[in-house]
Image (spheres, rainbow, N blue to C red):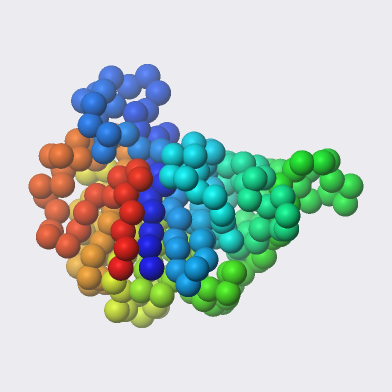
Amino acid sequence: MKITFLGTGTSTGVPEIGCRCEVCTSKDPHDRRLRSSALVETGGKKLLIDCGPDFRWQALSNGIDRIDSVLITHEHYDHVGGLDDLRPFCRESAIGIYAEDYVTDAIICRIPYCFRSNKYPGIPNLELHAIHQPFEAAGVEVIPIRVMHGRLPIFGYRIGQLAYLTDLKYLPEEEYAKLEGLDVLVLNALRRDEKHPTHEGLYTALEQIGRIRPKRAYLIHMSHKIGLQADAEKELPSNVYFAYDGLSVTF
């Protein structure tokens, strides 16, 4: 199994427009973060997790030539704003988009031209699937994990020994059993300051990792307030890493 981090930043990306802080002006490429998204490769299939507004550049930068299915965590723009850019991947046949029902409804409202009976030529051929229980995407078993993004219920996903949880503020107690025995956990850590209503900070994320006990964990969805990666990573346990755009991990 392989995961490639296409983006590891929060909704504004890093650098943030107009900011002149030390992170936003850093020359270190690890401090430049597109909106969070990942490509998971397993069993000969390629599954995209989230498709944000930076997707076109992410696909070009990482040489992506095929996507078999797309898993959407929730409806916020930084996670669905690039769906129209899937066009090159579904010219011959529809590509399956998997999300819970309120998210599929939101996608239809956001790009209604993709779902009309009389479709404009050249639009992406998207096939929406509302999911609740474990399901298969392109023949790959996927387990949805309930995540609370503040008061908004969203999904994370477990695929084999990998779990991808973004925009998490807290996990319902019953979800921890679904995260046992992981090789790799991907988890959000917005910033050092924990006082945010909808996202974990760095130290709460480390507490979660300590409880879930994966073999390795990678942090994503960081803002410029996480600090310079070269400095911040010194605070991490030996099995925890800051992911960065373009990082590929095989396990």
User: Which quadrant, please, contains the N terminus?
Assistant: bottom left
- How many badges with numbers are in the image? 0
Tell me if residue 178 can be seen: yes
User: Which quadrant, please, contains the C terminus?
Assistant: bottom left
Tell me if residue 198 can be seen: no
Could you tell whether 172 is left or right of 46 in the image?
A: left
**Closer to us: 149 or 130:** 130
Question: Please, is residue 67 above or below residue 227 in the view?
Answer: below
**Closer to us: 135 or 122:** 122
* Residue in the image at 45% along x and 63% along y: 41
* Residue in the image at 58% along x and 42% along y: 82
Residue 198 is situated, as x and y percent measured from the top left of the image, at 40, 50
Question: Please, is residue 78 above or below residue 168 in the view?
Answer: above
* Residue in the image at 71% along x and 58% along y: 94
**Closer to us: 138 or 53:** 138
Residue 221 is situated, as x and y percent measured from the top left of the image, at 36, 47
Could you tell whether 82 is left or right of 128 in the image?
A: left
Question: Please, is residue 162 above or below residue 21 in the view?
Answer: below
* Residue in the image at 77% along x and 41% along y: 122
Residue 63 is situated, as x and y percent measured from the top left of the image, at 47, 45
Could you tell whether 122 is left or right of 69 in the image?
A: right
